[in-house]
Amino acid sequence: MRKKRVIVILLLALALVVGWVFWGNRALELHSYTVETQKLPESFHGFRIVQVSDLHNAQFGVENETLLKLVEEAKPDLIAITGDLIDSRKTKIDVALQFVEKAIQIAPCYYVTGNHEARIQEYPRMKQALLELGVVVLDNESVELKKKDEKILLVGVDDPSFQTDYLCGDA
């Protein structure tokens, strides 16, 4: 009897862990931060950045409508897509590009790579498609953002995996 109870408890614990992992990979998390600094030019006060990261080909609603609605409701001045837009084990570049195509209609999009992009041979094609959609791809690059006569620098650094894992040479 005791052995059965232990097995049931272990199975229940396993089910909870699997459920938590599944939920964690499918749940949207929205966090809002306000950064205050005297170093920020006055014209950038109230500048809103939405950061989207680690989508791994996930879709939240049909064609990511749930995610895109949250992004739009935030009224961003800029959307920062910070890596792992795709999953290297189940790469669906079309899903990633479909999201970006709609996101760029909300606000200008800036993209940096993640480790999953470093693992796929299709990254050069994906990068080219992002550029064609109007995304600014920051591969160890920076760009000045200007408002009125003031500017800030936005810097994108490639994921370190591009130095060790990159499968297809120079992109």
Image (cartoon, grey):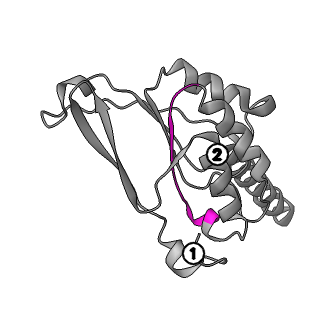
Q: Is residue 114 magenta?
A: yes
Give the left or right position of residue 50, taking residue 96 as reference. Answer: left
Q: Is residue 55 visible?
A: no
Which quadrant would residue 17 be assigned to in this image? bottom right
Give the left or right position of residue 112, taking residue 100 as reference. Answer: left
Q: Are marks 1 and 2 in contact (CB under 8 Å)?
A: no
Q: What residue is disc 2 on? A: 132
User: Could you tell which of marks 1 and 2 lies nearer the N-terminus?
Assistant: 2
Q: CA distance from mark 1 to mark 2?
A: 19 Å
Q: Position of residue 145 (x, y in %)?
A: 33, 37
Sort mark 2 into few (<14), some (14-19) or many (20+) by Cα contacts within 10 Å.
few
Residue visible at 20% across and 28% down in the picture: 149
Which quadrant would residue 70 be assigned to in this image? top right
Q: Residue 5 versus residue 67: which sits nearer the camera?
A: 67
- Up the image or down, 73 lies above or below 123; here it is above
Residue visible at 79% across and 53% down in the picture: 92
Sort mark 1 into few (<14), some (14-19) or many (20+) by Cα contacts within 10 Å.
few
Q: Position of residue 89 (x, y in %)?
A: 76, 65
Numbered circle sitting on residue 160? none
Amino acid type for the residue under numbered disc 2:
Glu
Residue visible at 70% across and 69% down in the picture: 120
Amino acid type for the residue under numbered disc 1:
Asp
Q: Is residue 7 magenta?
A: no
Q: Is residue 166 visible?
A: yes
Q: Quadrant of the N terminus?
A: bottom right
Numbered circle sitting on residue 170? 1
Q: Position of residue 61 (x, y in %)?
A: 77, 30
Residue visible at 66% across and 78% down in the picture: 167
- Up the image or down, 62 lies above or below 87; here it is above
Residue range of the region highlighted in magenta in the rendering = 106-117
